[in-house]
Image (tube, rainbow, N blue to C red):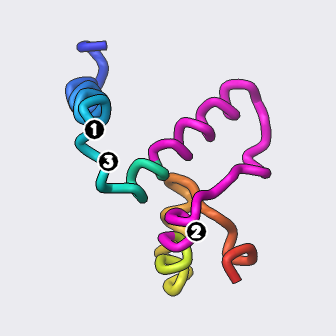
Amino acid sequence: MSNKPNSHMWMQLAEYGSAGAFQDKKTFEDLASLMVQIKKREEYNKSKTGLRYTEHLQQFFSLLSENSRTYQLLRDNLAGISLREIR
């Protein structure tokens, strides 16, 4: 993995996460967990519909959705609930 771009950053993030450094960052942990779920679905060519969003993520996405352009950027690059579902 050392030959891949950003591999050091990913290894550090995993080490910090394993050590519990993000325990008080519930939204971050939930977002990371969601990204893992999405990647697993992509590996098996499954749809992203039906993903479960925690209360923290629902609140986070709701706050960001107040600016729909900004929220759409988040959805395009990471993940998120549709604006229709939020409203």
Answer with mark 3 or mark 2, whichever residue precedes in sequence: 3
Q: Are marks 2 and 1 in contact (CB under 8 Å)?
A: no
Label 3 is placed on what type of residue?
A: Gln
Q: Nearer the viewer, mark 3 or mark 2?
A: 3
> From what the image shows, is residue 21 above or below residue 73?
above
Name the residue nearer the viewer: 70 or 22.
Answer: 22
The percent position of residue 66, horizontal first and vertical second, equals 52, 86
The percent position of residue 69, horizontal first and vertical second, equals 52, 78
Q: Is residue 79 left or right of residue 6?
A: right
Region of the chain picked out in magenta, as a range: 32-60
Answer with mark 2 or mark 1, whichever residue precedes in sequence: 1
- Disc 3, SS: loop
Residues at marks 3 and 1, CA–CA distance in whole angstroms: 5 Å
- Disc 2, SS: helix
Q: Is residue 44 left or right of residue 73?
A: right
Q: Magenta residues: mostly which secondary structure?
A: helix
The percent position of residue 17, horizontal first and vertical second, equals 30, 35
Q: Which residue is at a point 67% across and 25% down the rendered structure image?
A: 43
Q: How many C-alpha atoms fall within 10 Å of the one at disc 1: few (<14), some, or many (≥20)?
A: few
> Can residue 39 be found in the magenta stretch?
yes
Label 1 is placed on what type of residue?
A: Gly
| Residue placed under numbered mark 3 in the picture | 23
> From what the image shows, is residue 58 above or below residue 43?
below
- Disc 1, SS: loop
The percent position of residue 12, horizontal first and vertical second, equals 21, 30
| Residue placed under numbered mark 2 in the picture | 58
| Residue placed under numbered mark 1 in the picture | 20
Q: Is residue 6 visible?
A: no
> Can residue 33 be found in the magenta stretch?
yes
Q: Are marks 3 and 1 in contact (CB under 8 Å)?
A: yes
